[in-house]
Structures are given as structure tokens and as C-alpha cells.
Amino acid sequence: MSAFENLMAHARQTAALAQIAGRLGWDQETMMPPGAAAQRGQEMAAIEAVLHARRSDPQLGEWLAEARAPDAVGAAHLREIRRAYDRACKVPGDLASKLAQVTSEAQGKWARARADEDVAAFLPVLDEVVRLRREEGAALAEGGDLYDALLQDYEPGTTAAQIAEIFDAMRPRLVALRAAVLDRPAPQGIRGTFDPAAQMRLAREVALAFGYDLNRGRIDTAVHPFSSGSGADVRITTRTAETDPFNCLYSTIHEVGHAAYEQNVSPDLALTALGHGVSMGVHESQSRIYENQLGRSRAFTGWLYGRMRDAFGDFGINGEDAFHAAVNRVHDGFIRTEADEVQYNLHIMLRFDLERALMTGDLGVGDLEAAWNDRFKADFGYAVDRPSNGVLQDVHWSVGLFGYFPTYALGNVYAGCLHQALRRDVPDLDDHLARGVTEPATAWLREAVQQHGAVYVPRAVIERASGMAPSEGPLLDYLDAKFGALYQV
Amino acid sequence: MSAFENLMAHARQTAALAQIAGRLGWDQETMMPPGAAAQRGQEMAAIEAVLHARRSDPQLGEWLAEARAPDAVGAAHLREIRRAYDRACKVPGDLASKLAQVTSEAQGKWARARADEDVAAFLPVLDEVVRLRREEGAALAEGGDLYDALLQDYEPGTTAAQIAEIFDAMRPRLVALRAAVLDRPAPQGIRGTFDPAAQMRLAREVALAFGYDLNRGRIDTAVHPFSSGSGADVRITTRTAETDPFNCLYSTIHEVGHAAYEQNVSPDLALTALGHGVSMGVHESQSRIYENQLGRSRAFTGWLYGRMRDAFGDFGINGEDAFHAAVNRVHDGFIRTEADEVQYNLHIMLRFDLERALMTGDLGVGDLEAAWNDRFKADFGYAVDRPSNGVLQDVHWSVGLFGYFPTYALGNVYAGCLHQALRRDVPDLDDHLARGVTEPATAWLREAVQQHGAVYVPRAVIERASGMAPSEGPLLDYLDAKFGALYQV
């Protein structure tokens, strides 16, 4: 076998083992008996050790030095294999183990600190996590920007400067839109209780309407909704809240967006280094365009209103327009995961600026809470009332995820670009959505984005699909138009 | 670290990976989407390749040459690690791959041949499987008996001659008991339909009554009942048939016997080479004593009769004695898995003699069907009517499992020995069983057998627990007494 063929065979086996590790994660959140947690930790450590050894196998270095790609897709395989190999080799084994151990402890300490509203109790371990991730970033950056180096794990080929340029342009327009909308009377909300089993039946119907393939997937309930797996086995979870059926339905549509990306990667790429979504940002663009631009559109909510009435009878909303307004209600709140389309990105930009300052060393963890609270007051107009509603609300930093947050908002920006192009290419899309048919949109996304897996780097995916470099303009224009009409601002 | 400590660390990681492979098997039978089968095949192959590479790692040979065990349990660890290493090294890689490939094809061909009642269509691939397994047996035996060599995978430390001595003593007594019992009028069977959900609720209650720990396990439905996993994550499956609740209930008790063995291994042995049941035979002794000697006893069925009446109302049986007779009904039939306590071992002995002759070369696959049919007629008194009721009924030989069948009957023999000792040590056991309480029996088995995992070899387990070398006497005496009373013979 040639060096290239050897690399491909090695990558296939690594990809298969990574699928197994992912499925263990799914099992842990859905099926695992509670008493199995400690043993599962050892099992996960064992398969992660196998994966790490494979990714840093010196044999890969020899093959990579020799390998010649037969074509452009082959070159993309080599790019991804090389990236994983370089990353695995650059970080000293001791540092990787120490990070795994400290972040595992830190997650527990964060959960207790949040429950106790005790920031001080969390700061020492957070400081240690920050120190270790800066050390890792420095090892990866080799003299370059260490936040940029960390970002490559989540959004390869994208720099913090590129993100900052987009975010800086977004912030004033979103702050202004938010203030204008919240100055107007709130639309009516839904009322009543909604049978969880009926919510799950409707969620299943909606998942199928968005093209989720249940022959290669399944839907279960879990504490946090997620999508897991690639190719022929992509599972999603959702959850039900008795007074809020939108939580179940829109979590399902969001996860179907992620799952569709993984299910629709070309079978030629299955179980290779390219057989999955290319980045967190592009992944989020799929989940968000399914959830928001399609799922919360006037046309689709018109159809959903009828199905909700069939399933639940009267819930205090009369007519499709009022239902569309209820689905898109803008409301005050401290919590990122509960934020609406207008305010969500403000939560992200706050985190991006703070975590970047933590990584560059411009901000110490001792000043983090004050910096968070000042920024929140500036953008949202009211003060954080307690740490669990502020700096302690997210798990991410405790587990060392610095560089991850911005990809949520990047996903929204990408979704804006893709949506603009989709509407141009499918001018009668609303006629379909109004009948609960998403196929013209999902087929366009499958063709333009999903089938390519990780063949193209994130910015290239968006440029090829939308005909433009990623930019905040289309998203902001869409939000202004939508919420301008809904709130008459 | 010393060579011994290195071996232990290596074994822990291998054991964790083996748990993962087992859990994938569980997922495949219970949760996996149907369209994921081909991808799952590649995932299983990837983790099996990792396990094989670990087991034949030359580093193990160096450590094994140096290692000194600190105590008797340490010596047992070395014994099991050495056994797996020697086995992995003795079989050439090409032969192992060829066997995996041919048995995978053979299973499909067997399923089609069984559906078509076409023995001739199965014989060429069976011949190839037999040839490859003989080759493997010869590599393992290194000049010794090749069937004995294959047997070591399932019942280490036991020889075919030892098994034959036991089986030869059993056969005439079982043939005679069977003929005498079937000469008597059949007891009344149960009548009616039994709600599957109510069957599952009662199965769960019965599983708990037998000590199954749901905090470290779970019960699902699958086509074939099985138990999967060790230590803190041991899952079982069962199935329901609307007119036969005993299928669900006694499959559950049987699998709880297997699961209890795995759940009750000492935590000190968790995720090591000794952290699971020692052999198929000892495993089957646990499932069978739970299912038969305890679960089908007059005392326990007296309690179960009340619970069945509570759950299902009238089902055509009046009184505990009639219920006990119905549960223990002896009936004609061709199929091993549906056989009763009296006849089950006759099905096994037939297969043991035939597969041993296939392995020694005394029997060719061309003569297998005739040999099966002659033997069946001799022991059961009537002729096999079609191949799916005869030589094509079991999957085992198609997947190369030669040496596995006798462990089913050995398990019954071991259960007989253990039951005799248990009754001696717990004279008032029936008083407990009559109230649905199995704890005195399960505690005895946990102490005597289950906690030790694979520390002692199978024959030593039975000798230590029952005070006698494995022998058919106690089982036959138990069967004569029980069915003699039930059928008045």
C-alpha cells in the first residue's frame, strides 16, 4: 500500500473508534444505569487513550512525509489527518493528562459553586484551568496568537481578529434592535399544560418534516438536548416541559439541523477524517437555520399552529399571526440558553471578549465577575442579580472550552448568509413551508453544505454555498426585517 | 512500575475496552437504528482489532517473563493474562482474519438454508468453517487434542474426556426418565392471553426478587434474551409472547442469574482479567440454578402463582400444585431452546458427540444430517421432520462455536452440585422461597461462587463451593425426585 492508502486505512479505523466513543457519550446521557458512572469514566478514559495514541502514532508522521494526494479530496484528507497529528504531537503528554484531570475536578467544583452562588469557591480551580489552557495554547501556537491556536479545535482556519471584526459590527445594531423591540408591548404568550407524550409525538412528526432519517437515527429524551454520531447512526435527544411545548419542539428542530448535517455527508466520506461536519460554527449554522430562519418563519409557524391545535386544543392563541408572534417573543432574561434570536448573540459576544482577555492575560480570573456584570449592564440595561445568572451560568470554562463560545454566534452569522442565498435560489420556499414541507430548503442545504462533510474549511463552505465571505450583514438585515415587522419598530 | 504492575495496568485498559465492545453488542440488539448495521460492522471490527493487538502485544510477553505475583490472586491474574496472550500469539493473523470473514458469511448462508430447509446449500461453507477451526485447534493444541484446545475458550481447564465421562453417565438415566414421564398423562397448561406490559412489570418484580440491581443494570426487550457487561453496568434483555408468560418470566430469571454473577464479582477485581464470570459452564450454572432449582421449585412457584393471579386474573389453573406442574410440564419437541429440564441435556449431548467427531475428523459434514437424525430418533423416540427442526436449528456451528455446546449441560451439572450444597447449608430455604424471598440462596451463591469472578478455574469453583468434584449425580437425583413426584413415576 502507498503512504496515502496507509493513512486512509488508519484514518478509517480511528474514525470508527471515534464513533464508538461518541456512542458511549450518548449512552451515558440516555440509557446508562446511574450506578455505572465511575466505571464508565474508566471506560471512556481507555478509549480516549487509544484514540490519542493513534492520533500521535509516529508512523503517521512518516506516512505524512511521503504521501501524495491523488486529487483535491485526497488533499483534504491529508489536511485533516495532518492537523490532528500535529495537534496531538505538539501538546506534551503530561500537560494533556493534567488538563483532563483538572477539568474533570473543575466541573464538579463549578456545579457546587453555582448551586451555592459562590464565585470565590470556583476561582482557584478556574485559575488553574486558565493557566493550563494558556500553556496548551502556547504549545499549539508556536509563537503565534494562543487564542487563535485554541480556536482551531472548533473553527479551523478562522482567526479571532476575523471574528472580532464581525462581532464589533453586530453589537451596536443588536443592542439598538433589542432596546427598540423591548420598548414595545409584549405579544401574548401561550397558556395551559401540554401532555409530554403528545409533545414527543408532535416533535417526531416535526423531525420527519425536517428530513430526519429515523432509519439511521432515533429520538430519546435527555436532560440536555444533543445530537450524536455521524453517517448511518445519528441520534438526537430532546426534553419536555409541561408548560412550554416550544422547548421540546424547537430543541428537536435544532438537533435535527445538527443531525441532518451528519446524516447527509456523502457516503464516500463515511468513516474517514472528512466524514462529519467541518466545524462547530458550520454545525451551528445548520441547527440555527433549521430552528430559526425556517422553523420560526411566518410560513412554517402557520402550519405548526394547525398541528398544535390538533394536538393540544386551545392554548390561548387565536390565529397564525398571533402564534408567529408568540413563537418569536423577545423577553428579558439572564440566561444564554433561554435567549431569543435578537439577544442570543449579545450573550456570546460578552463571553468571547472576556475569554479572549483571559487567554491573552489582559484579564485575571479575580476580575472576571466584575467585568461580566459591567458588560451585561451595558448591553442589556439591567444588573445581574446573582452569579448563577451571570458568570457561573455556563459549564464551558470549567471544562476548559476557551474558543468554543464564538462558534455559536458565528453559526448564526453563517446561517444568515446561507438563508439569503437559499431564498434567492428558492423564491417560492414559503409556499412549501406553509404546508409543513421543508424539502426545498433541506435539499438546498444538503447539496450546498451538508454533503461535503469536512472537505472544505469553514469559510470556504460558506463562500461556496452563499457566494459571499462570512459577514454579519445578511443576519442583521433578516433580524431587522423580521422583528421590525413583528414589533412595528 | 514492576512488570506485574505494568501487566495489571495493561489488563485494566483491555478490560475497559472489552466492556465497551460488549456494550456495542447490547446496543446493536436493543437500540441501534436498523440502517446502521453496515457501519456498526466496521465499528465492531475496529475495536476488535484494537483488542486483538493489545492481547498479542509483544510487550506482554516480556512482562510475563519477568513478572512475579505478590499473592495467590496475583497469580490468578497472571494465569488469565498469560492464557489470553498465548492464545493470541498461537493463532496466525491470516487464519484469524479468514475465520472472521468466513464465519460472517456462513451465518448468513445458514439463516437462508434454514429458511429454505436446504441442508445442501449450507454444507460447503460449514465444511470451510470446520476446516478453519480444525486448523485453529491444531495451532492452539500444539500436538494435543484439538477439540480440547478449542474447549479452553469456553471452559478453561476442562477436557472433553472429563465431559464425556459425565455425559455418558447421564444419558441412559435421562432417556429412561424422559420415556417414563412422557408415558404419563400431561398436566394442564395455562390458557388465555397475557398483556405484554403486565408481563414486563411482573418480570421486573421477579428480577428484583432474585437480587438484580437495577442501579447497576437495566431491562429491555430484544429478539433473544441475553445478559451483557460486568461490574457496575450489567444489562439484561427479555421478550414477551402473548400466550406464554413463562417465556418472559423464566428468560428474565435465567438472565438475572447470569447478571448477578457479573454484578457480584468483588469490586477489587473490577476491570481486570478476573473481573467477570470464569467460564460459560459456571455462568450457566448460575442462570440455571436461578431459573430451575429456585425459580421452578414448588416453593417459589407457590408465591409466583399468587402474583400471576394478581396480574392476570384467571388463566385456567387452580391451585399452587397445578401451577407447579404447569411450569414444569414435560413435552415433546425438536427445539433445544424450548426443551424442559428433563430433556434439555439430551439435546446438548447429541451436539457434543457430533461436533467432537467433526473436529477429530471421524465425521464429515456430508454425513452430519443423517448422524443427527439417527441420534435424535434413538434418544427421543420420533423422527426429525425437517432440517430447521434438526441439524439446521442452531446458529452455533455456522459461526464456528465448536466446544461451546457442552458448557450448557455442564452448567446444569454444576447447578446440581451447588444446589445440593445450598440445600444442606440453608435447610429452611423453601420457607423463604414460598414468600418470594430468594436472598438466602442468592447470598450463598454470591459468597460461594459469584464474588470470586475468574480467580479460580471452573472445576475449582465448583469443588470449593459444593465440596465435591463436578459430577452428574446430584443433578440426576434432583431430576428423578422432582419429576418422579410431579409425574408419579
Image: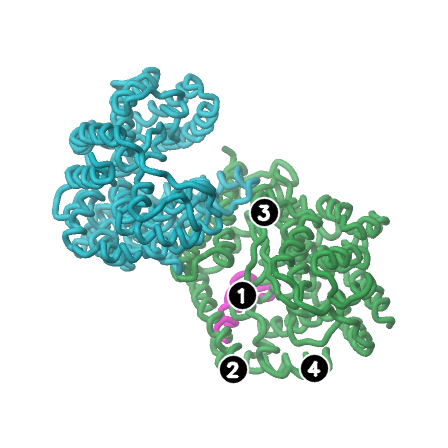
Chain colours: A cyan, B green
C-beta proximity under 8 Å, tags 2 and 1? no
Q: Nearer the viewer, residue B105 or B66?
A: B105
Distance Cα–Cα, label 3 vs label 4: 43 Å
Output the chain of dot 1: B
In the rendered structure, the answer to whether residue A451 lies left or right of residue A227 reads left
Residue annotated with mark 1: B138
Residue at 35% across, 21% down: A384
In the rendered structure, the answer to whether residue B439 lies left or right of residue A37 reads right
Q: Residue at x 52, y 53 (%)?
A: B86
Near mark 3 (Cα within 10 A), the count class, few <14, some 14-19 or many ≥20, is: many
Q: Amino acid at mark 3?
A: Gly
Q: Earlier in the sequence, mark 2 or mark 3?
A: 2
Nearer to us of marks 1 and 4 is 4
Q: Residue at x 17, y 33 (%)?
A: A166
The amino acid type found where label 4 is placed reads Lys
Q: Position of residue A40 (x, y in %)?
A: 50, 41
Left or right side of A238 for A266? left
Q: Which mark is residue B377?
A: 4
